């Protein structure tokens, strides 16, 4: 038994040495000033470098040409707290890519080619405090539950994107939000924007430039005006406007009422019919008794 252990010791030492070496190795074309930082800024990368030290906490990948992130990318890097992917070629984020980033505090996805932030993109990243999504000119859609679970998020940047509308539920799901940037988007001042306008009015202190820093296009002539020149009365006509959800509720309510009316009529008719039969039976018995 002892000779076997003695034989295995060099083999185990080799494996341990390899794992430790891999844990501290620095990717080519990158700088690693310490065991927890990997700086690959401005290196012309077309993919995420490999290998990356398993204990990395700060990963800087800005100013490259990276088009996508592997869906299992963050599984191995559970200590990562700072991720900078600014100014790359990202067009989408695969579902689940960021769902394992339990310790991530800072995430910069600005200046990319993102088109949509779908619901559940960030999973339960409860430690995330600052999220940058600005300067994505093709980003025109943010799912209602896109930021659900980001209970610690304090700063959200959505400036200079292609957003014309935003569901107010997106912002209401962020209880810790302190700073919000929405300027530079082609907002449309229509009835879909009315609820967001009310939210912004009530939370204008969270906007770095206030309401004056945000403009929207008027539906009639397309003229852009600062939100500071508008009021809730500007959307007065929208109060009588039904949304698609409202129409569905009305239709469903109408169907429900109709079904209830039919059932009630059928029950009433059946009851009347039964009483009539009972009444006829009683009269027949009385006539037989008289005879």
Image (tube, grey):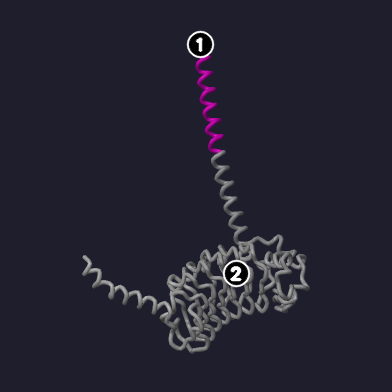
Q: Residue at x 50, y 73 (%)?
A: 80
Image coords of residue 136 (percent x, y) = 58, 80
In the displayed structure, would residue 291 be above or below residue 143? above
Q: Which mark is residue 129?
A: 2
| Magenta residues, dominant SS class | helix
Q: CA distance from mark 2 to mark 1?
A: 91 Å
Q: Position of residue 239 (x, y in %)?
A: 71, 61
For discs 2 and 1, the disc positioned in front in the rendered view: 2
Q: Which residue is mark 1?
A: 289
Q: Is residue 134 visible?
A: yes
**Vertical side of 270 occupied by 245: above or below:** below
**Residue drawn 57% across the image and 46% down it:** 258
Q: Nearer the viewer, residue 263 or 136?
A: 136
Q: Do we see residue 220 in this rendering? A: no
Label 2 packing within 10 angstroms: few (<14), some (14-19), many (20+): some
Secondary element under disc 1, as helix, strand or loop, is: helix
Q: What segment is highlighted magenta in the picture?
A: 265-290
């Amino acid at each position: 038994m002892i000779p076997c252990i003695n034989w295995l010791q060099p083999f185990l030492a080799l494996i341990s040495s390899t794992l430790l070496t891999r844990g501290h190795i620095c990717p080519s074309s990158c700088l690693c000033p310490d065991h927890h930082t990997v700086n690959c800024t401005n290196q012309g990368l077309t993919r995420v470098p490999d290998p990356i030290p398993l204990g990395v906490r700060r990963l800087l990948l800005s100013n490259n040409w990276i088009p996508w992130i592997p869906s299992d990318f963050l599984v191995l890097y559970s200590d990562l707290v700072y991720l900078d992917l600014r100014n790359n070629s990202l067009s989408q984020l695969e579902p689940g890519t960021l769902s394992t980033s339990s310790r991530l505090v800072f995430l910069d996805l600005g200046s990319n080619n993102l088109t949509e932030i779908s619901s559940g993109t960030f999973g339960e990243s409860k430690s995330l405090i600052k999220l940058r999504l600005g300067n994505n000119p093709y980003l025109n859609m943010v799912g209602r539950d896109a930021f659900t679970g980001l209970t610690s998020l304090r700063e959200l940047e959505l400036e200079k994107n292609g957003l014309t509308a935003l569901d107010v539920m997106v912002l209401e799901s962020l209880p810790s939000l302190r700073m919000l940037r929405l300027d530079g988007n082609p907002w449309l001042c229509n009835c879909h924007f009315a609820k967001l306008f009310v939210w912004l009015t009530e939370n204008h202190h969270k906007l770095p430039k206030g309401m004056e820093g945000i403009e929207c296009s008027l539906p009639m002539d397309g003229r852009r005006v600062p939100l500071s020149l508008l009021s809730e009365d500007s959307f007065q006509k929208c109060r009588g406007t039904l949304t698609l959800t409202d129409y569905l509720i009305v239709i469903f309510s109408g169907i429900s009422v109709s079904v209830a009316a039919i059932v009630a009529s059928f029950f009433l008719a059946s009851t009347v019919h039964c009483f009539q039969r009972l009444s006829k039976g009683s009269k027949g018995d009385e006539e037989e008794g008289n005879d």
